[in-house]
Image (tube, rainbow, N blue to C red):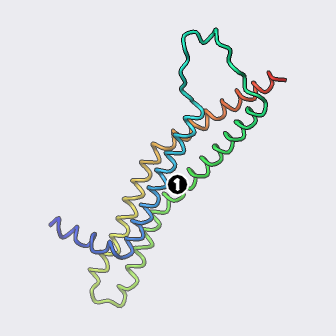
Amino acid sequence: MLGDLLVPIFQNILGYDLLIILAAFGNFMYLIFILGHTRKVYNVIYTQGYQPDDFNEMQVARPTRAQIKSTKANLRKMRETSNKYYTMFVSLSSIFPLLGILGTVVSLIPMIQSADMEQNFYFALTSTLWGLVFSIFFKVLDGTLAPRIEHNEQGISEYLAKLENELVELK
């Protein structure tokens, strides 16, 4: 019984479903890239450094105006890049139900002239299945990614404000 259900799913893998699976693989690779970028942003904002016990006695070099302006420009660029990548990931994730529906329609069109309606109907439903599976999968992953992006966004805003205060103090 279970084999009867799984056979059509895997038979159509080389059909339109392959496009959906390749799109999912690409989106997953994009997700890995975005996670790396968010980690990089986090490390820039929340640097963890060693401070010896006699830190107060040490003289700490204050950053120059040029260094502060460069850091601000880098942070703004990182914010823009992060938002662009995240928006692209969300957009790509949202097309999976549409790809599933498109696969269904593409599979149902030949059914009009075919005597083997049952086989075409199975193929049509597998596209819908893969579209929904990947849509749910990426929606769950988005739920873990969105808070990271928001946390980094808040951290960048606070860090930029801190740098702006340092610029004012240098005047």
The residue at 79%/21% (across/down) is: 169
- Residue 106 lies, with reference to residue 43, above or below; the image says below
- 82 lies left or right of 72: left
- Residue 44 lies, with reference to residue 129, above or below; the image says above
**Image coordinates for residue 102, horizontal then vertical, percent:** 45, 73
Q: Residues within 10 Å of mark 1 (few under 14, many from 20)?
A: some
**Residue 119 is drawn in which quadrant?**
bottom left
The residue at 57%/30% (across/down) is: 46
Residue where numbered disc 1 is placed: 89
**Image coordinates for residue 10, horizontal then vertical, percent:** 27, 70
- Please state, as top left, top right, bottom left or bottom right, where the C terminus lies in the image: top right
Q: Nearer the viewer, residue 136 or 170?
A: 170
The residue at 45%/56% (across/down) is: 29
**Image coordinates for residue 99, horizontal then vertical, percent:** 45, 68
- 67 lies left or right of 119: right
- 152 lies left or right of 141: right
The residue at 51%/59% (across/down) is: 92
SS at circle 1: helix
Q: Nearer the viewer, residue 65 or 73?
A: 65
**Image coordinates for residue 132, horizontal then vertical, percent:** 39, 61
> What amino acid is labelled 1 in the image?
Phe
Q: Total marks drawn?
A: 1
